[in-house]
Image (cartoon, grey):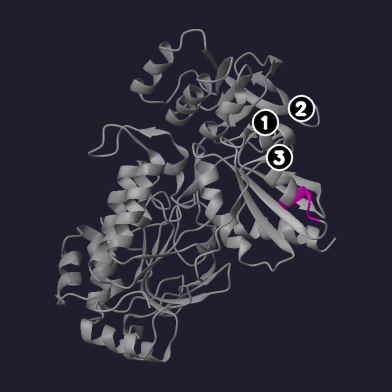
Amino acid sequence: MLLSKRFPPIKRDSMRKSAVMISGGAAVLFALIVGFGFRSQCGAPRRSSFSLSSIKSHKQVVDVLIIGSGPAGLSAALYTARSRMHTLIIAGDKPGGQLTETTYVENWPGSEKQLGRSIMSSLENQARRFGAEILQDSVVGADFSKWPYTVQTEDGHTINALSVIITTGAHSVTLGIPGEKEYWGRGVAVCAICDAPFYKKKDAIVIGGGDSAIEKALQLAAFARHVTILVRKTSMRAAPVMQERLDKISGKIDVLYNYDVQRIIGDGDQVTGVEVRNNKTGEVKTLETDGVFLAIGHKPNTDLFKGQLPMTPQGHIHVQGRSQATLVPGVFAAGEVEDDVYRQAGVAAGDGIKAGLDAVNFLNEIGLNQQFADELDNRGVYFDAFESEPDALTLLSSMSEFAKHVEGMSKGIAVVDFYAEYCPSCMMMLPIFSSVSKRYSDDVHFFKVDADQAKDIVRYLNVPKVPALLLYKDGKLVAKEMKTMSRQELSQWINSYLAS
C-alpha cells in the first residue's frame, strides 16, 4: 500500500470558498461544473456521479493521480501528499521534465545558481518524504467520461483516479525539413549540454533566437571551435541579460539574422552542413558545420487528452479563471500543458501547487475523509501494483569486462547504455533503460557504461556521443542508436532483433 492514515480534519466548505475567489463569469462556470452537475461537450460526468460509496467495489484506486514529473507535477504532489492524500505520480518518458536538460538555473526562487537536475532531485525527494509514490511508467490512455477516471499505462496498469492532475509538459519543436530526421542523433540534436564535450575542435550551429538558443550556444562554446546562431528575424527575443553574455565570448560565437534553414546536409553518416536562405534577399547558401542544435520552441504534450478536454488552437489545455481546474470536475492541469505565456519553471511549480490545492479541495468537497480512507485501505482498494525495484544494471568499467560480458556472449542479446553524469538526457534514460530490462528474460542482458569513466571502451567502440545504445547479438554488434528512447521505442527496438 502507498499510504495509510492520510487525511486531516475536513473543512467541507473549502471548495465553495475557492469558487468565491474566482471572479466574474469564471465563478459562474466553476459553480456550474462543481455544484450543479454541468455536463460539458467532452462528456464529463455530472456532479451527482461523485458517490464515494461506489469506490468500494473498485481496485487500483488513487486519490490523486499526477501525470508527469516536472516542476508542476512534483510541486502538486508535495501539497497533495502533505495533505495526506494518496498520491501517485507517473513519471513519463522524461523524468524530471525539461528542467533536467539545462545546466545552471539562476532564476529559481531562493537559489542563486543551481543545476536543473539538482532542483528536480530536491523536489522529488521532498515529495517522496511526504508519502508521494513515483511509478516509472508512461500513460497511453485516459478516460474522463466517467468517474472514477481511468488511466492506462504502457506497462499494462489500469488505475482508477478520484482526481487527476495533468503536468505532461512540452517537447521540443522540430523543423520538419529534409535531412533533419535522417541525421537525428548523428549531428542533429536538442540537448547541447549532453553533446558539447564531443564538439572539441568542431563547429556547431544553433537554430533559434530565445534564451534557450543562447544557453545552448554558450554550452557548446566551452568546447567547440566556433558556434553560429541562426535567427529567423531581425533581432533575438532572448532576455537582455542573456544577450549580454554573448559579448563576453568574443570571436567564439557569431549571430546571423534573417536566415531560414532549408535543408540539413550530411555525408550519409554525419552532418556536414546546412542550406540556408536569407529571407530578406532570397540568397541561398551552404554553411559548413559538424552539428545542428534546435532551440525553436516547444509544443504542449496534450495529444492524449484531445477530445476530452477543451484546448486552445495551439494545444494548451484550457483552465478556469484563476484556478487550475479544467471543464471536467476533478481534473486539473498545470505547467506548460496549459501555460502559453510565462513558460518558466518557477511559474510551473506555482501552478502545480495551485493544482494540488484544487485537487485536495475537490476531494474534501465530495466527502473524502479519514474514516472513509481507512475503510478503503482495509478493503485493499488502493493501488498496490508497484513492481519491485528494477535489478541493478551491471556496470562495465573496463575493456576486459566488456569483452567478457558482451563480446564474449555466444548466444543471446546484450544491450549497452552509454551515459555520463553531466548529461541530463542520459540521466533521464537510465531509469527507462532499467525499467525496460525487467520485461525480458535471461536471453536479453542489460549493461551500462559510464562514458566519462570508461574512456577505453568509448575509444574502442568509437562512441561519438551520449546517450548511446548499442545492441549485440551473439557477441556481434548489430545496431547502434545515438538518442534517447521512450519505453515503447526501446522495447520495439529490442524486439525487432529478438524476432530476427
SS state under label 1: loop
**Could you tell me if the residues under marks 1 and 3 are in contact, i.e. CB atoms within 8 Å?**
no
Magenta stretch: give its range: 405-409
Circle 1 residues within 10 Å: few <14, some 14–19, many ≥20: many
- Residue at mark 1 to residue at mark 2: CA–CA distance: 9 Å
Q: Which of the numbered marks, if any, corresponds to residue 187?
A: 1
Residue 126 vs residue 259, the one in the foreground:
126
The C terminus is located in which quarter?
bottom right
Instruction: Give, as a three-letter code, the residue at label 2.
Output: Gly
Examine the structure image and report whether residue 42 is included in the region drawn in magenta.
Answer: no
Which kind of residue does numbered mark 3 sit on? Lys
Question: Horizontally, is 91 left or right of 78 in the view?
Answer: right
* 428 shown above or below 5: above
Q: Give coordinates of residue 215: x percent, y percent.
A: 45, 27
Q: Which residue is mark 2?
A: 266
Question: Cβ–Cβ below 8 Å for labels 3 and 2?
Answer: no
Residue at 82% of width from left, 55% of height from top?
A: 474
Give the vertical position of 262 relative to 284 (above or below).
below
The answer to which of marks 1 and 2 sits earlier in the sequence is 1
Q: Are marks 1 and 2 in contact (CB under 8 Å)?
A: yes
- In the picture, the quarter occupied by the N terminus is bottom left
In the image, is 23 to the left or to the right of 209? Answer: left
Mark 3: which secondary structure?
loop
Residue marked by disc 3: 181
| Residues at marks 3 and 2, CA–CA distance in whole angstroms | 12 Å
Q: Give the main secondary structure of the magenta stretch.
A: helix
Q: Is residue 331 left or right of residue 22?
A: right
